Image (cartoon, grey):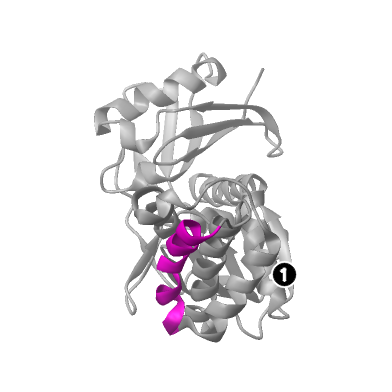
Amino acid sequence: MTASWIGCDWGTSNLRLWAMDAEGRVLEERQSENGMGRLQPGAFEAALLELASEFLPASGTMPVVICGMAGARQGWREAPYLPVPCTPAAHGAVHVPTADPRLSVHILPGLSQADPADVMRGEETQIAGVLREDPGFDGVLCLPGTHVKWARVAGGQVQGFATSMTGELFALLADQSVLRHSVGAGWNDDAFDAAVHDALADPAGWVSRLFPLRAEALLGDPAPGVARSRLSGGLIGAELAAMRGIWQDRPVGIVGADALSDLYARALRQEGTTVTRNDAREMTLSGLRTAHAALSEVTS
């Protein structure tokens, strides 16, 4: 199998690697649990070689383009943030010296915003992927996850962005607060929709609706999934209320995992917003293709 270059998405928990041909098609995909959080800076090259060694040439070098947390301060080598507004995945990649001479590694930078202060690392590559597929996109990209990113995109650039810790808050409340005794499995669409509506109508009051989730479980017998759905809907509704100035009256593209993206799409459509969906894996690959092309121009 002859690869032309290698693309990597190096997250906190996992490393995903794709061997690519000269046309940017995936030849093979591999994954390991050697995420940034498990590695010391000196261990990154070995973790990469564990997945990539058979794709390396007998002589010459293999270009490797990496996005994500490998470029964090605690990662392989820090790739400084690029301030917005800017074009994602177009410049600023950091070359990483390696012991194996067959590797030519570049790590892509994240994006930063001074006021209000914010950063992203990894999501910018997915945004670049959306722009590769739709260069004229003018709207907002929502990237759900533990920390949800909302990016205003126009003119081929990220103009500004905001982060919500909704996913982390849900995990903390559902797994570590008193609500863990009430938030069980299952799902209820009606409960989710009602909670989104209530939080959007009264975002300042959504906190007061948290403890009743516990009290109702003690005093009655709620249907399975109601508490979980209401917690999720309340948090997402409050987030949408906080981000209303970004997404309202603009088309929204969602980039993320299906289950979580479904919830954001459902909530936004309740508000009459035009929503399109983008597969996170495909947008990451598309963004890596953009970065590889930009690096090829610089080095050619």
Q: Residue at x 53, y 28 (%)?
A: 31
Type of amino acid at the residue the image marks with label 1: Val
Residue 158 visible in the current orientation: no
Q: Nearer the viewer, residue 9 or 108?
A: 9
Check the picture and name the quadrant holding the C terminus.
top right
Residue 270 visible in the current orientation: yes
Magenta-colored segment: predominant secondary structure: helix
Which residue is the site of mark 1?
275
Q: Secondary structure at mark 1?
A: strand
Q: Is residue 84 above or below residue 8?
A: below
Q: Nearer the viewer, residue 239 or 155?
A: 239
Check the picture and name the quadrant holding the N terminus.
top right
Q: Nearer the viewer, residue 30 or 19?
A: 30
Query: In x, y percent, where is residue 118?
Result: 36, 69
Query: In x, y percent, where is residue 295?
Result: 51, 48
Q: Is residue 141 above or below residue 204?
A: above
Q: Residue at x 26, y 48 (%)?
A: 73
Point out the stretch of residues depicted in magenta: 204-220
Query: In x, y percent, where is residue 110?
Result: 41, 57
